Structures are given as C-alpha cells and as structure tokens.
C-alpha cells in the first residue's frame, strides 16, 4: 500500500493567468508508506498544494509516474474513483464544501459515491463522525449551524468515511484557535496510530510538525530540499530561514540556552524534549 | 472548463481603445448596436463587420481570445440559424424530408448569424478593453442625467461592478469546490444529462453559500470604510474627454451617418 512518486514535473497551463507556463514541480521523486506521519513544509508558492493534488489524480503530471501499490495510476483504465477513496484528500478550508441538510448525510456523500449499500454508508459515516469527536446528538444538525472547528471536523469526517488508507490534508489547522489545533492534531495522531492511516499533511506551523510528524519533506521552488526526520531537518536552521521558513520555538529556546553556556544535547525540537533536557541538566 | 468563459473579462492592454474614456466606449457600444439593427443589406453588414474588424485590430485583443467568448452563446446562435434557414418562406432552393431551404432563408440565416456574432463581439470589446472600475464610472457619469427622475444610478453602477468583480472569484471558488467534491468521489464527467445535472448540486450549494458569505463580508468591509452611497462622493481619477475621444466620436458619427445613408438609399 505504498505511494511511489517517480520524477514528476508539472507546469501551469492556463492562458491569461499570470502563472501560465510556470514550472511548479520539478523532477520530484519520493515515496510514502502507511507507517509514517509525514509533513510537507515549504514557503508559499513552493508547490506543496500542487504536489499533494497529484497523489489522488486531481492533477496529472507532465512527466514522470506515480505508483500506488506498485501500479501506475496513469495507466490506461486505472480506476480513479477507487484511488480517490484510498487516498483521501482534505483541502484547505474544507468546511466550504459542506452542502447537505444534516451532518450525517454530508459525511455519507463520499461512501455513497463509492456505490456501497445504504446501511454500510450509514455505518461508515457515523463511525467517521465519532472518530473526529462528534456525539450522536449532533449527527442531525445542519452543517451550517456548527462552529468553525466543528465544521472543519465534519468535513474531515467526510473524507474519512471513505475509509482511506492515506489521508492527505492541506493546512488542516488553518484558522483554528490553539485548542482547536491541538484537538485536530491529537485526532490525526490517534488516527495514525490506532487506525493505521498514513498521514501526509501540509503545514506552516513548525511547532505542530515538530510535535506530530515523524518525517519532514521540505519543498522549495518545486524541488525537494530535505526529506528526513524533523530533528534532522531542523538542524539546518540557517538554510530554512533563507527560504522563508523557521525552526520550532522549542529549538530556538534550546539554542539560546546553549549560547548562554548551558550544554543541552542537539536535536531538541519539542517543548517536552527541551523540558526534559533542562531538568536532566540541572537534576 | 469554467475558465473558458471569456465573455465580459478584461483583457489587459494599452491600446488607444483601452485608453479611451469609458463613456466614449459606452456610446460606441450603443451606436454599434443601433447600426447593427439598422443594417438590412449586404453593404451595411459589410460596413458593420469592417468597423468591428478595425476596432478589434486597434484594440490589439487577440481575435482567438475574443472568439472564445462566442462559445457561451453557440447554442442560441445555432438555433437561430436553423430556424431562419428552414422556416423562412420564399423561393425554394432545395428540400429534403420535411425541410425546405429557400433563398430568402439562407440570406436571413447568414444575416442573423452575422448580426449576433457582431453584437456579441462588439459589446464584449467594451468589457475586454475597459476595467470594471472604469466601466462603472462610465455608466455612473454617462447616465447621471437619469438621477433627475430618481433612478439610483450610482447604486446600479455599484451593483454591476461588484457583480463583474465577483465573476472570476466565483469561478475560482467553483474550481476548488469541484476538486474537493471530486476527491470525495463525485463525478460530473460521465452519465447522461439528468445525472450530470444532479451531480452539480454538491458543487452549487457550497458555491451559493460562499457567495452569500462573501456578500456579507463585503458589505461589512464597505461599511467599515464608511461607504454610504454615491452622494457627495468625489473621485480619485475624474473622467475627462481627451483629444482621442473627440476624434473617435467624430469617426463614430461618420460611421453612423454612413449606415443610415446606406439604409435610406439602398431601399
């Protein structure tokens, strides 16, 4: 169940637009498996969103190939629908795609499109809603009267209900308050550990990716700059800064302490790690 | 697919036509429509086509880009051609099954097609060469005299410019929504007409919801900037007729006079 991306390139091609003809992705090769929680980071315009849309065939590369489970998704007669149910994609601000009269029917839209029987559709939809933290009492509320965070979770449930093997999210926490962010990321972490869903997410929050991801892919100008563990990637603080990214707050704090002569080990990127290191140092 | 609709979208440029006062272009559009409906023989149609050709040439808007705008009205065009072709009585040219084609029918079909194409290209030339802002200014100033009889000219102009401004935004939004629903297994490409129409519901409802949301946000933003209608409002760039406007208008009235002469003398 792995996704293998082989040397894909892509350029925009809509005349009249200012981006026309621009090369967005250049020769990207990477592979994903379900055991990893991967975060894709990069400055605005680096091709992150374009890249993830290739993984479920919403965009088609000009060159290169993508294999899902060893099979080329560009092969003639490849089942797109099946691919899209296996590789679930949650767009930025997914709450704007809600349309049904109640939450449960909206979440049922995905599985219904897969042609599943009615009771299986209901089962999957309610299961997905419970997974994202809805209570049964809220199943029949209108999606338009929910709070922002609830809408977001309902929309994510809409993709989860197709029971994908991979879940790709484009900035899932954008516009949420700190509590909402934490809840969302905890939920994704849970989904990954217990549900065995491979997670690939695009994020701008270095703190979040340091805390939750076990693999970081840094994109810059359509190319992969780094593909390593968060600790490894964040050790290149200067290079990250030069392309408009940053290191997590915790890593900065640790560096400041080191500059003051407190010898802390390298590779600290979360608050938890820094706290333990400081306690060890003085304890 | 929705990006193909070029009707009414500004095409950036710096030609003489682009720099004309929007009121001049509005007047031109009205005059051109009038001449199209005055035309009833091949000479005046030729003059209309020629005038349009010259205008397009000066405006430097690529002709291919303009023709794309015709796609939106293709069906109306085809229907009117067919009706005129088959349902006009007169001298029989040839017939098959229940259809009869007459000489007058061919003539009318050709003229009707020409008239429609010129009408669309001629009017879209204005929106191609005028930014929505200029256009609104032009309408507001050009029709300002209607205020006397209590027509809310400013409000109408404002509504128009907002509507025009929202077209590209909403197409972009629709694109996004289609992608998002496609990722959930929606399918709008296969199936018959009814199935396709039904498949549009999950796209259109979020689009309407977002249009209302945007409208609300825009209203708040306008209020926050103390917008309270057109009364006492001054302009950063007041409209002024220049030398090229007067030259253009002279040419335009010469053209109008020519068409009228053709109509009167070639009866």
Image: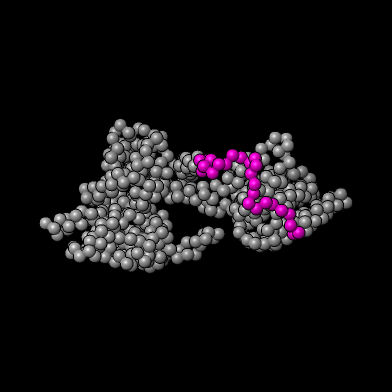
**Left or right of residue A280, residue A12 in this image:** right
In the image: residue B97, left or right of residue A281 = right
- Farthest-out residue, left: A283
Where residue A266 appears, x then y in whole percent?
A: 21, 64
Residue farthest toward the right in the current orientation of the protein: B265
- State the residue in front, A281 or B209: A281
Q: Residue placed at 71% from the left, 59% from the top?
A: B55
Instruction: Out of A242 and A283, give the one closest to the viewer.
Output: A283
The residue lying at 29 percent from left, 58 percent from top is A248
Figure disc tally: 0
Look at 51% across and 40% down and name the residue there: B220
Question: Within the magenta stretch, is there residue B70?
Answer: no
Residue B167 spot, x, y in % from top left = 55, 48
Q: Position of residue B87 (x, y in %)?
A: 72, 43
Q: Is residue A109 above or below residue B243?
A: above
- The residue lying toward the viewer, choosing from A24 and A6, is A24
Whether residue A189 can be seen here: yes
Magenta residues: mostly which secondary structure?
loop
What percent of the width, then of the height, locates residue A51?
38, 59
**Residue found farthest to the front:** A260
Question: Quick check: can you spot residue A34?
Answer: no
- Region in magenta: B218-244
Instruction: Describe residue B97's horizontal placement relative to residue B46 as left or right.
Output: left
């Amino acid at each position: 169940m792995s996704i293998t991306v082989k040397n894909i390139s892509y350029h925009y091609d809509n005349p009249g637009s200012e981006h026309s003809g621009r090369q967005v992705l250049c020769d990207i090769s990477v592979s994903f498996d379900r055991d990893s929680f991967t975060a894709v980071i990069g400055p605005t315009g680096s091709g992150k969103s374009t890249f993830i849309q290739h993984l479920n065939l919403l965009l088609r590369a000009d060159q290169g190939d993508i294999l899902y489970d060893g099979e080329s998704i560009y092969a003639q007669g490849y089942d797109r629908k099946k691919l899209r149910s296996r590789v679930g994609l949650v767009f930025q601000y997914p709450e704007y795609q809600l349309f049904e009269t109640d939450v449960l029917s909206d979440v049922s839209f995905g599985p219904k499109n897969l042609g599943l029987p009615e009771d299986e559709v209901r089962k999957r939809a309610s299961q997905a809603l419970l997974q994202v933290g809805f209570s049964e009492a809220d199943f029949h509320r209108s999606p338009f009267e929910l709070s922002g965070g609830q809408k977001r979770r309902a929309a994510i449930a809409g993709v989860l209900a197709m029971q994908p093997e991979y879940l790709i999210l484009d900035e899932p926490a954008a516009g949420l308050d700190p509590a909402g962010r934490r809840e969302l990321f905890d939920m994704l972490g849970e989904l990954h550990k217990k549900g065995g869903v491979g997670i690939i997410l695009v994020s701008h929050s270095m703190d979040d990716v340091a805390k939750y991801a076990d693999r970081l892919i840094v994109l810059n100008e359509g190319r992969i700059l780094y593909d390593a563990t968060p600790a490894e990637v964040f050790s290149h603080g200067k290079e990250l800064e030069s392309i408009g990214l940053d290191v997590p707050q915790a890593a900065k704090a640790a560096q400041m302490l080191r500059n003051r002569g407190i010898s802390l080990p390298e590779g600290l990127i979360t608050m938890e790690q820094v706290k333990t290191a400081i306690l060890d140092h003085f304890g | 697919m929705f990006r193909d609709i070029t009707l009414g979208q500004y095409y950036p440029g710096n030609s003489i036509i682009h720099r004309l006062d929007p009121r001049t272009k509005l007047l031109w559009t009205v005059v051109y429509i009038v001449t199209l409906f005055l035309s009833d023989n091949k000479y005046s149609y030729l003059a209309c086509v020629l005038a349009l050709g010259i205008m397009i040439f000066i405006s430097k808007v690529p002709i291919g880009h303009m023709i794309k705008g015709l796609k939106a009205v293709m069906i109306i065009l085809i229907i009117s051609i067919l009706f005129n072709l088959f349902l006009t009585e007169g001298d029989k040219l040839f017939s098959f099954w229940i259809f009869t084609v007459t000489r007058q029918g061919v003539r009318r079909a050709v003229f009707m097609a020409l008239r429609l194409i010129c009408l669309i290209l001629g009017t879209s030339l204005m929106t191609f060469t005028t930014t929505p802002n200029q256009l609104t200014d032009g309408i507001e100033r050009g029709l300002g005299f209607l205020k006397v009889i209590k027509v809310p000219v400013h409000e109408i102009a404002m509504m128009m410019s907002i509507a025009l401004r929202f077209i590209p935004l909403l197409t972009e939004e629709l694109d996004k929504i289609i992608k998002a629903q496609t990722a959930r297994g929606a399918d709008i490409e296969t199936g018959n007409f009814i199935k396709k129409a039904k498949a549009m519901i999950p796209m259109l409802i979020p689009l309407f919801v977002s249009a209302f949301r945007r409208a609300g946000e825009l209203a708040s933003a306008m209020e926050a900037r103390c917008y309270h209608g057109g009364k006492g409002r001054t302009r950063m760039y007041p409209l002024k007729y220049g030398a090229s406007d007067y030259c253009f208008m002279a040419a335009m009235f010469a053209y109008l006079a020519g068409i009228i002469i053709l109509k009167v003398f070639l009866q």
